[in-house]
Structures are given as structure tokens and as C-alpha cells.
Amino acid sequence: MVQINRGGNVPPPPPARRVPLIAGNWKMNLTVDESLALIDEMLEDLDAYEEVETVICPPFIALFPAMELVEDSGIKLGAQNMFYKDSGAYTGEISPLMLREVCDYVILGHSERRLYFNENDEDINLKVKAALKDDLTPIIAVGENLAQREDNLTAEIISNQVEIALNDVNAYDASSVVIAYEPLWAIGTGQAASAETANEVCKFIRQTIVRLYDQSVADRVRIQYGGSVNPANISDFMCESDIDGALVGGASLKAADFVKIVARTQECIPRKKK
Ligand code: PGA
């Protein structure tokens, strides 16, 4: 039974506009040396786009040395996963307490975690609450597969994923999370969703937040699109009303492409549809 928790401190009033958030999900790619070289290659260029919040999510072992590299920049770091306990006999896992020393964000519930590592919505909810407790901002990934889309189940799948991920999360905390809409059929395929389709689902996610909490929480939550985002299609997504950023896989591994994605995101700010 999903519990809606409307308690907690009252969230601060919604900002005049949500700051766009571009996150690069490097997945299981690059050694530590290669990771640092890639960050070094793009850091200065990325840092020029101050109106965009940019997050790099390298493999765990690159986070600590990367911290020093990004220290004097506006670039933030994120992890790609974590366990929900702070410490204990959980061989091979990484805890939120460990992560908060080295990063600000953590991607939770990515479809590759759900698919290959059997994570379910309940696990993701435990991780979301653990991240929030330890001051990490979760980027909660949700999305339907192709068969579900063809069976018109997108809304049902997405609302269940969002609702369970936020089970027992109070309104104050909920207002700080990021949700990434990543349709499985668009991830790594080169076949991005159309901007209209992506915006429709992002808008639906926002309405789901209104239903679970209220409009002011929904107005604060940032919702990203992810799935084959590249420099050529980012502007289409970023001009849409309810898309507040992107979770970028493949294109975040190429310095020039990732910088262009961030640059075009900033250019879209004044052109955003209402
Ligand atoms: P992609 O991956 O940009 O390579 O499609 C996105 C993601 O999995 O977050």
C-alpha cells in the first residue's frame, strides 16, 4: 500500500523558473585515468554555461579523484547507483554516507539497474529515502518499454513507478528530487522519443506529483528526458514546457558533444514554451 506523506517542512516557494539540469551518465565506461582526462577536456568549456546545472556521473572509483578536478568549477558530480544502508555487511555495495563525501547527486532506478540487477520499485524507494536522508539529490529514472507503450500502458507504468519511488517521502524532500523520464526503447538506440512525446510524459509526471502532493511541489521538481539525447536534438527537448533537462548516456562520453548539449540547453532558456 503506497503511503502519501504530505508532512515535513513546507517546501520553499517554487522558483520563477526551474534551473535546467544536464547529467552525463557514463555507465560502466572509462578507467580512472580516462575519466579524469575526459573531465579535464571539457571542464572549462562546461563551466562557461552558468545558467545550466551540469552533473557528471562517472564510475564510482573515479568520483574521489574527480572531486579535486571539479572543486573550483560549477560542475557537480553524481553516482550511478548506491545501496540504501549507511554501513554494514553488504559486500560490494556503496553507501549514501560514503557518496555524500564525494558527490551531490545519485541516479537511482536506471532501467539497466532494473533489468540486469533486478531492482524493483520498492528497492528504489528505499534508496530514494536513504539518499534524501544523507543529503544526496536522487535522479529517479522511470520509463516504459516498447511493449508497454504499444499496449497503451505508459501512463499506468510511469505513475506506479513515480508513486512507489516517492512512497513515504515528505513534501519538502519530494520537492528537491529530480525525475528522469527514460523510455527504454530510446536508451542507447539512437531513436530518441519525439520532443512532443517526451513532453507529454514529463507533463504527466508533473501532474502525478500534483496528485501525490500539490502544485507547489510539482512546480519545483525537475523532470529530465533521457534516451539518445545528442547535440542535434537537445534544443527540441529543452524548448518544451515540462522538460527541465536531460540524462545523457552515449553523448556524455564525447567532450565536444556534451559541451554542445549544455550550450544548447542554455540557449533554450529564453525560448522555452509556457
Ligand atoms: P543514451 O543513454 O543517451 O546513450 O541513450 C541514456 C541513459 O541511459 O541514461
Image (cartoon, rainbow, N blue to C red):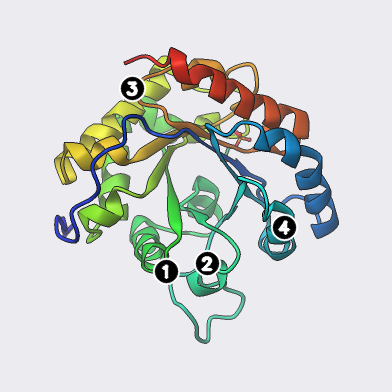
* Residue 190 at least partly seen: no
Q: First in sequence, mark 3 or 1: give its number.
A: 1
Residue 15: horizontal and vertical position, in percent?
31, 36
Location of residue 184 in the rendering, given as x and y in whole percent from the top left corner: 49, 36
Please, is residue 43 above or below residue 196 in the view? below
Residue of label 1? 134
Q: Are marks 4 and 2 in contact (CB under 8 Å)?
A: no
- Label 2 residue SS: loop
For the residues bearing labels 2 and 3, Cβ distance under 8 angstroms: no
* Residue 10 in the image: above or below residue 143: below
Residue at position x 40%, y 45% in the image? 178
Name the residue type under label 3. Glu
Whole-angstrom CA distance, mark 1 to mark 4, is 21 Å
Q: CA distance from mark 2 to mark 3?
A: 34 Å
> How far across and how far down the image is residue 77, in percent?
60, 53
- Dot 1 and dot 2 residues touching (CB under 8 Å): yes
**Residue topped by disc 2:** 100
Which amino acid lies under the numbered mark 4 shown in the image of this protein? Ala
Check disc 4 and report the residue beneath it: 66
Local packing at callout 3 (Cα closer than 10 Å; few below 14, some 14-19, many 20+) is: some
Q: Residue at (60%, 21%) from the top-left corner?
A: 264
Q: Is residue 80 left or right of residue 242?
A: right
Amino acid at dot 2: Arg
Q: Mark 4 packing: few (<14 Cα in 10 Å), some, or many (20+)?
A: many
Question: Where, quadrant-wise, is the C terminus in this rendering?
Answer: top left
Distance from mark 3 CB to nearest ligand 1 atom below 8 Å: no
CA gap, disc 4 and disc 3: 36 Å
Q: Which residue is mark 3?
A: 200
Placement of the N terminus among the 4 image quadrants? bottom left
Q: Nearer the viewer, mark 3 or mark 1?
A: 1
Q: Classify mark 3: helix, strand or loop.
A: helix
CA distance for labels 1 and 2: 7 Å
